[in-house]
Image (cartoon, rainbow, N blue to C red):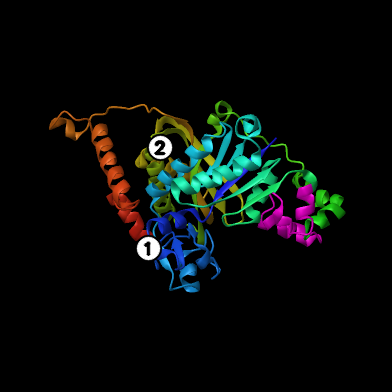
Amino acid sequence: MKLIHIDMDMFYAAVEIRDNPALADKPLVIGAKPHERGVVSTCNYIARKYGIRSAMPISEAYKRCPQAVFMRGNMHKYVEASKQIHKVWDDYTDLAEYVSLDEGFLDVTGSLGLFGSAEKIGHEIKQRVFEETRLTCSVGVGYSFMSAKLASEENKPDGFFQIPTAEALRELIIDRSVRMIYGVGRQTELQLNSIGIFTVRDIYSCRERVIQSLGNHGRQIIALADGIDERKIAPPSERAAAQSLGKEHTFQKYITDREYLKDVLRLIARELSFQMRLAQTFAKTVTLKVTFANMTKITRSQSGSATNKTNTIYDIAASLLDKVERRPIRLIGISLSGFTETAVIETQLSLFDDFDDVPAVDKSDKLDDVAIELQKKYGDGIVKSGSELISEKRLGEGG
């Protein structure tokens, strides 16, 4: 198998710099303005020198680099750039798995006879992406998911690297941190450190200790450290049912106020709705994700008629939250799944029907269409409903 992993360099920030070259020599943070509640979506490499990173609270980023340029993101621009990028990638294979707007895996095993080696394809993709978008990307070529991912990270930014075999992978990572292994996050790293496992070499030397500590997860870590990774990209027909779109928010302190939590859900619903409407798709299932203060995670889902409306998504998520036990919450999020290109439109009577022939649901659609056009022109966040403004005001007052 020949896999290519492509990761756009500081994607949101790069789009803004492309459109405004005056930002190129300044630390740039995308997410929110100083003193607004929010987190860093991404930042350029100059800002990263100050210790700023994705998902960091904006307040902390401002403390570290008050002279940085802070901007709210313009999701429409990023989606449009992503469509251009994906169009290039799709020219080389129909076996693609997009991790996000700016990152994806391509299985080019079946494309080698048409386009040449995986190395040639990778270089060609890099060149075309830059020529067509003026954005750079880092490309990794490997024999598996993990090898391709690690290869793309090896020479960032604007890099290219290959890991052709399991032996090459083992040689590359043997003396590196266990965090190099797919699935080893901060908590797993701490567990491994507690039993004297700090590097990949330690995993090789203490296999039984890893299994005793982590069970099946430990066995998976050992297999990946050995270069064994049998994950594959499924054909589009098999992936469709598993696709989802989600967004979540991690709080700086544990939250028990349900109205505050619903304010966050309302704003998350707005962002998801915006992305769905730009893509002209609808979702049948809304899933609420909650992480409690003790790190226990739960999900609650509800399926029904396909929708991409902010209020519908929010109402379902809020009703699911009402059924969750009242405990301090560390993280809350919404994901949408069960995508379709059509929605069931339910016509309903309203007070408007006494005055004209336009059903209320159509009025809502027209207002949403106007909002989308304004957002396309001026950026995400230019149009907000009264309830959204109230939510933002309460969030601001809550710090």
Tell me the residue at 70%/54% (across/down).
180
Position in image of residue 52 (x %, y %): 53, 66
Locate residue 209 relative to residue 134 in the image: left or right: right
Q: Is residue 338 above or below residue 21?
A: above
Work out whether residue 20 or residue 258 is closer to the camera in this orientation and state it: 20
Instruction: Look at the magenta stretch and give its main secondary structure.
Output: helix
Q: Mark 1 or mark 2, which has the lower sequence index?
A: 2
How much space separates mark 1 and mark 2, taking CA atoms?
Answer: 30 Å
Work out whether residue 278 or residue 187 is closer to the camera in this orientation and state it: 278
Residue 279 numbered tag: 2
Position in image of residue 65 (x %, y %): 48, 72
Q: Is residue 177 magenta?
A: yes
Residue located beneath label 1 in the image: 396
Residue 22 numbered tag: none
Work out whether residue 178 or residue 364 is closer to the camera in this orientation and state it: 178
Q: Which stretch is magenta?
A: 168-197
Please, what is the three-letter code of the amino acid marked with disc 1?
Gly
Which element type, helix, strand or loop, lies under badge 2?
A: helix
Q: Is residue 144 visible?
A: yes
Locate residue 118 relative to residue 99 in the image: left or right: right
Please, what is the three-letter code of the amino acid marked with disc 2?
Ala
